[in-house]
Amino acid sequence: MNSFETRIVKTWKPSVFLRIVFIILLLGGSALTSVFDVEAKWLRVTGSFAFMLGMFGALSQSFIKPKYLGDIEIDETRVKINLANSTQKFLISELKEIGFKYGGYASFWKYTLHGNKNHIYFTTLSGEKYNYEIILQNKQMKEELKYFLNDLSSTESLQFKKFGNSSF
């Protein structure tokens, strides 16, 4: 493999307030419909509606597409980062380490359908640190990156660090 290329993204992270609202809706709605013996029909309907709204809010977060910021391309000689308004290039010989925090690839059971929160970072010899959230869309893409980074770290005087899920 000569290079690896993927998208740089930013995943939407819901606020604490929004999470609390969804939890209150879920718990309140389920309590009104399942736990308490409520005689008033309007309370049962309101509880069911609150529960459905809470479930919709909680489950819909995996369908929100991450915001596209640019592309990253890594080959045997350089790391090229194309963001919306700038392009940066770093030679592999100028890097001290490359790290990867693996969270998984895209699936319904993971963080989002569009890909998990995977981070690739690197440190230059001058001490500058760069950290980017990237998308791995499927298992094949994960294996390509794994093979490429292992191959790159074995041929260069470059440290490669792995974090996160142990399956990487």
Image: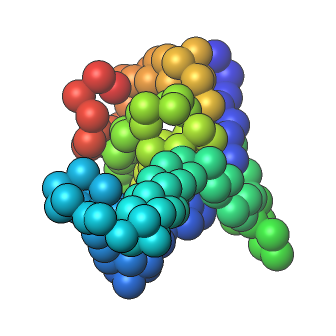
Q: Is residue 165 left or right of residue 71?
A: left
Q: From the viewer's perspective, is residue 152 above or below residue 118?
A: above
Q: Residue at x 46, y 71 (%)?
A: 42
Q: Position of residue 38 (x, y in %)?
A: 26, 64
- Depicted 51 relative to depicted 148: above or below: below
In the picture provided, is 85 more to the left or to the right than 150?
A: right
Determine the residue located farthest toward the right in the rendered image.
85
Q: What residue lies at 73% left-to-right and 51% top-to-bottom?
A: 71
> On the image, which quarter does residue 161 sit in?
top left
Placement of the C terminus among the 4 image quadrants: top left
Question: Closer to the camera, 23 or 27?
Answer: 27
30 left or right of 42 in image: left
Q: Tell me, what colour scheme is on the image?
A: rainbow
Q: Is residue 92 above or below residue 66?
A: above
Give the camera-side residue of 45 and 167: 45
In x, y percent, where is residue 82? 76, 59
Q: How many marks?
A: 0
Q: Nearer the viewer, residue 83 or 30?
A: 30
Q: Position of residue 41 (x, y in %)?
A: 42, 65
- Residue occupying the far bottom of the picture: 17
Q: Is residue 124 visible?
A: no
Residue shown at the point (69%, 47%) measured from the top left:
7
In this view, the residue farthest toward the front is: 39
* Residue 114 visible in rendering: yes
**Percent x, y for residue 131?**
46, 63
Q: Quadrant of residue 68?
A: bottom right
| Quarter of the N terminus within the rendering | top right
Which residue occupies 67% across, 22% down?
2
